[in-house]
Image (cartoon, helix red, strand yellow):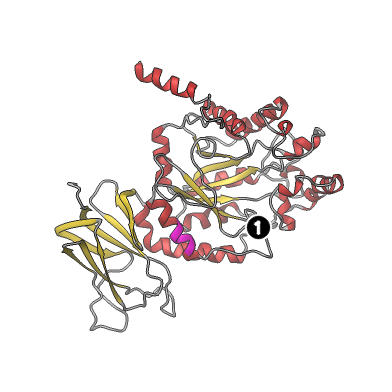
């Protein structure tokens, strides 16, 4: 009884900010947040009809002229026809890259619905394509074992335009908290999304003010108490990573390029190596990594993005074991070595980054964070440690020794991944029967 009262008072108090900032209400079930954290790596997809011009998604409407808005709203949807869109291909790309969930932009700030809605004609159902990509992606995610996630923004520039309100991000009439009609409209759309497609696993609520996110989050929890609300209920740093682990579940979202939606020119992409290192850092700090891709107007992943996803898939094919049922250590890393620990065994995975590590070269490292005993063993994910190609006289076996400073590791990079023998991405070393220094377990 006292626990229920405490929880109730916490929920009530959370509605009244003490700092002047809008409060964050989190009614996610702890066991569902643990489930979400275990999923670790997800694909974010920003896609709307204005991708046809390679522009920033939605934001060109803010402050635009009447003539621009008329063409944007009434003409541009008439040519949106992503005939190449294949939901299974998108989902399998995510799955191959080791991603466990997918979050799709059902409606961004522009108000254009990328799903079948009864609330407005400003939707993909009133384009030449006239099909529901949200349903296709949800169905494909379920077929291939990915958790289902949707993005929704209560901000709605089309709604403002349709009601004669200047399109803005900050004026009171543009806010759901100050505009009852917009608030009701957003809730109607959220109710559609939460009831038309079966159980939704994850909801990402964007938008400028916390009020709209909180109101929609409560609606989501009312419909499906097991749903996990990320943005709107937990920390979701955008394009940055916290310096240290956060005390509660969190999710960092990054773009693959510089823009959320596909930009055909003037774009700079992260390398696969940068993405892999970011994934390691985020997971070793206990967070989830939501990596954004931007399909083009025909529904294809552009070749540049596809190539990066392919390299990530290759690395995960070798090293994906390290992210399954693992958790951070109390020390996230030592220098260029990062750590994850198996949840139920005394196994630790060491992500060892040496960008110029040549094939057949042996390197050594001392780890003060870890210790072991005579039963401790070492291996390198993906390689048996018995053969170095074309060099039968060389022993590539990894070695582990107890030292005064903890554990001494000696590892050879012995697996040929590329034809030119150059592989810029980290090795993952598996240590069994080890523990953190000072720990009894």
Residue 264: where, in percent of width, then height? 68, 63
Classify the position of the N terminus by image quarter.
top left
Q: Residue at x 42, y 31 (%)?
A: 29
Magenta residues span 274-278
- Could you tell me what secondary structure mostly forms the magenta stretch? helix
**Residue nearest the viewer, comparing 157 with 146:** 157
Is residue 273 positioned above or below 176 on the image?
A: below
Residue 159: where, in percent of width, then height? 75, 35
Residue 4: where, in percent of width, then height? 39, 19
At mark 1, the secondary structure is loop
Q: Residues within 10 Å of mark 1 (few under 14, many from 20)?
A: many
Residue matched to label 1:
262
Q: Quadrant of residue 347?
A: bottom left
Q: Is residue 86 magenta?
A: no
Most extreme residue toward the top is: 1
Q: Across the whole image, how many numbered discs are drawn on residues?
A: 1
């Amino acid at each position: 009884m006292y626990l229920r009262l405490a929880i109730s008072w916490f929920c009530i108090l959370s509605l009244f900010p003490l700092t002047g900032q809008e409060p964050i209400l989190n009614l996610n079930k702890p066991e569902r947040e643990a489930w979400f954290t275990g999923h670790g790596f997800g694909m974010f997809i920003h896609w709307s009809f204005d991708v046809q011009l390679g522009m920033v998604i939605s934001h060109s409407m803010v402050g635009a002229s009447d003539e621009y808005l008329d063409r944007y709203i009434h003409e541009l949807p008439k040519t949106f026809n992503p005939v190449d869109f294949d939901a299974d291909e998108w989902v399998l790309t995510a799955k191959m890259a080791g991603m466990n969930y997918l979050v799709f932009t059902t409606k961004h700030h522009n108000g254009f619905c990328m799903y079948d809605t009864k609330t407005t004609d400003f939707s993909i159902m009133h384009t030449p394509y006239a099909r529901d990509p949200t349903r296709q992606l949800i169905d494909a995610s379920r077929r291939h074992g990915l958790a289902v996630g949707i993005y929704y923004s209560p901000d709605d520039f089309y709604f403002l335009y349709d009601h004669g309100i200047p399109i803005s991000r900050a004026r009171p009439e543009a806010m759901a908290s100050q505009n009852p009609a917009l608030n009701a409209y957003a809730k109607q759309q959220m109710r559609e999304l939460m009831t038309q497609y079966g159980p939704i696993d994850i909801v990402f609520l964007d938008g400028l003010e916390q009020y709209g996110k909180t109101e929609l989050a409560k609606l989501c929890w009312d419909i499906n108490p097991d749903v996990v609300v990320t943005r709107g209920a937990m920390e979701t740093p955008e394009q940055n990573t916290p310096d240290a682990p956060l005390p509660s579940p969190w999710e960092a979202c990054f773009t693959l390029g510089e823009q959320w939606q596909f930009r055909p020119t003037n774009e700079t992409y992260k390398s696969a190596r940068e993405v892999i290192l970011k994934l390691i850092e985020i997971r070793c700090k206990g967070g989830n990594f939501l990596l954004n891709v931007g399909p083009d107007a025909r529904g294809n992943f552009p070749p540049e993005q596809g190539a990066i996803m392919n390299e990530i898939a290759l690395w995960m094919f070798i090293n994906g074991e390290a992210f399954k049922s693992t958790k951070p250590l109390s020390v996230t890393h030592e220098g260029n070595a990062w750590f994850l620990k198996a949840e139920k065994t005394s196994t630790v995975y060491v992500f060892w980054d040496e960008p110029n590590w040549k094939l057949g070269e042996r390197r050594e490292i001392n780890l003060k964070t870890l210790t072991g005993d005579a039963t401790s063993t070492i291996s390198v994910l993906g390689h048996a440690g018995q053969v170095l190609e074309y060099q039968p006289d060389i022993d590539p076996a990894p070695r582990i020794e107890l030292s005064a400073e903890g554990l001494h590791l000696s590892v050879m990079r012995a697996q040929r991944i590329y034809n030119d023998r150059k592989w810029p991405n980290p090795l993952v070393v598996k240590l069994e029967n080890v523990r953190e220094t000072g720990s009894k377990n």
